[in-house]
Image (spheres, rainbow, N blue to C red):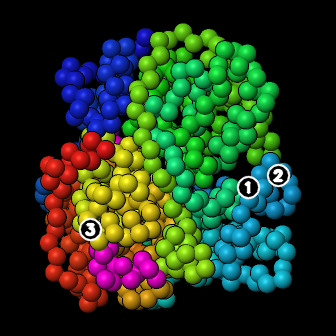
Amino acid sequence: MEKKTNDSTKEPAINDLTTCDATAQMIAKARRDGVEIDFDRAAAMKPCPIGADSACCKHCSMGPCRLNAKDPYGKVGVCGATIDTIMARNFARMIAAGSAAHTDHGMGMLDLFREVVNGNILDYKIKDPVKLMEVARSIGIETEDRSLEAVAKDLYQELERTYTQVEGEIPFMKRVPEKTLQTWRKLGIVPRGAMREVMEMIHRTAIGVDQHYENITRQASRTALSDGWGGSMVSTEIADILYGTPSPVAVEVNMGVLKEDQVNIIVHGHEPNLFESMIESVNEPTLLEAARNAGAKGINLVGMCCSGAEVMVRHGIPHAGNFSSTEAVLVTAAVDAMTVDIQCIKQGMVKVAACYGTPLITTNRRCRIEGAEHVELHEHNPKECTDEIVIRAITRFKNRSHPIEIPKQVNQGVHGFSYEYINYMLGGSFRGSYAPLNENIINGRIRGVAGVVGCTNPRIKQDYVHVELVKELIKNDVLVLQTGCSQIALAKAGLTTPEASVFAGPGLREVCEAVGMPPVLGLGSCVDNSRILIAASEMVRTGGLGDCLADLPVAGAAPEWMSEKAVAIGQYFVASGVFTVFGVTFPITENTKFHKLLFEGLEEQGLGKWGFTPDPHEMARMMIAHIDKKRKLLGIDKARERTLVDMADRRAIEAA
Ligand code: NFS
């Protein structure tokens, strides 16, 4: 067994690390087994205080320069860079990296779409032609009396511009409410192709180029918008076209979805291509027979993180947990193959997997990990890869040599609320519309809408901030939309079922009960935050809630964020007009001009603004206060008290 390598003489109490009982059980087992996982590393590695405040610049070899966050204007870097320049550059580079991740993922999806449309790839097909036609129409492609193939080819050509366009506006700008677009035009932040925006962002943040924090921030917004309204949106739309647009489906979540008597295969990562092919492989009669011959009752395919969220909302595939559980789940010793592609894959999994004899298999040319096995997925013949992984998993099942301990927790949720389904659900099949949503916001039954999204982070108590925040929001009649790891936290807390509407305030509860929907709607993976942008645009278009996205009574939060992608998402929500609150930490020093720009100045320019607090109750207060402010400006405010989640509510939720 692996010995602990970090000095963790003072082991933190497990209930300070997570509120997820299954993960807690596995942390305890890992300690007994002498295996180090992410929570141990987080305890042993304190964050660098200078880096945490973004007061460090290492963009050239005259440095690295360290400024003092306590005395931000006391010093400058060797080149003369002020703390505002340094922080703006660091923040902008996080946005460039996060945007590059989403847009590269989206471009991979578009490459696949092109090959499918051209008939070069036969293993994937256009599964949702209705969606294809709708997306084409939404960006001005003629669809009347035209073949699916002809429209698909035009759609590919148009969407390619999302990445490559040198000048002018990218196609999905046609979906942005007019007044929001005008604000962007005035500020010069309408994105061109993402390749250009990311390239320019990296250039401008190099030594000796852009040294005005306001100018850097403008390009940061433009880059982030090329992600949210570009790369991420393409990814969502193409995944829907190829694999089907989600509609609500009952799903099982938590580590109890693993089965001791079956071959357990986990897919973790981001691009749905791997998972879709894996679904085919685990249903292959010859492989099922091989599994039975090895003594297994079947092959159990489950997801984690965003890959898991993609197939959970499309196919109802069970989900074993979010980012902070990806090492803990290996401690069960029940995982016969952990298969990954790109993004949010912790290198630490290699050692943990080795301790329990689980093959950790990378599949994407863009993500290799030293010590992991590599079985590359080629989209022209994806089953070659996924069949091979199933065979390796069956072999591992046959040779299982570690005692297995699977936590019993299995929670139920209903997920898969695409923009299209919300339209249908609220308006009915003949008059699909967002009008009922707007009406219920105007009449006050629904106070506003919150997007609660993003990662979990082993530096803080897993799931706690997500769940406490959302409980308080729904109690105050705020409808919650969710993506990514956050929705898994809420599913584990039992709040993504229609029955959970009893925990909502009276207005939201009435709406949920009338429609039969949960008060917390899971929309999909992190790139599916684009669904929230589309839904918000439709709310503006439907009328009665102002002229632009910034007028809406909405707010966003990434309560337990850790990834640069989360910063990119935060910035595209802020640039779109949304008040967005981060938890955990904020990588910018207070009492600086750059901080003031992010937290106040951007709103004065007609955009949204940033907020920060690690405390879920304070976060709820800030978001509700913002929603109420917007209601007041719209003239739809009624005096109402903020309701606190009391002990009785807490007990009721815990008992559910
Ligand atoms: Ni998004 Fe965070 Fe990762 Fe997905 Fe999960 S950690 S920023 S939610 S899996 S991308």
Magenta span: 435-458
Which amino acid does the dot numbered 3 rest on?
Pro
416 inside magenta stretch: no
Q: Residue at x 37, y 31 (%)?
A: 22
Q: Position of residue 616 (x, y in %)?
A: 22, 54
Q: Residue at x 60, y 41 (%)?
A: 341
- Which of the two discs, 2 and 1, labels the residue nearer the N terminus? 1
Q: In this view, does 453 lie above or below 30?
A: below
Q: Is mark 2 on a helix, strand or loop?
A: loop
Q: Which residue is drawn at 23% across and 77% down?
A: 628
Q: Distance between the residues labelled 3 and 1?
A: 46 Å
| Quarter of the image with the N terminus in it | top left
- Which of the two discs, 2 and 3, labels the residue nearer the N terminus? 2
Q: In this view, does 126 lie above or below 358?
A: below
Q: Name the residue under label 2.
A: 121
Q: Mark 1 points at which residue?
A: 112
Q: Residue 506 carries which label?
A: 3
Which amino acid does the dot numbered 1 rest on?
Leu
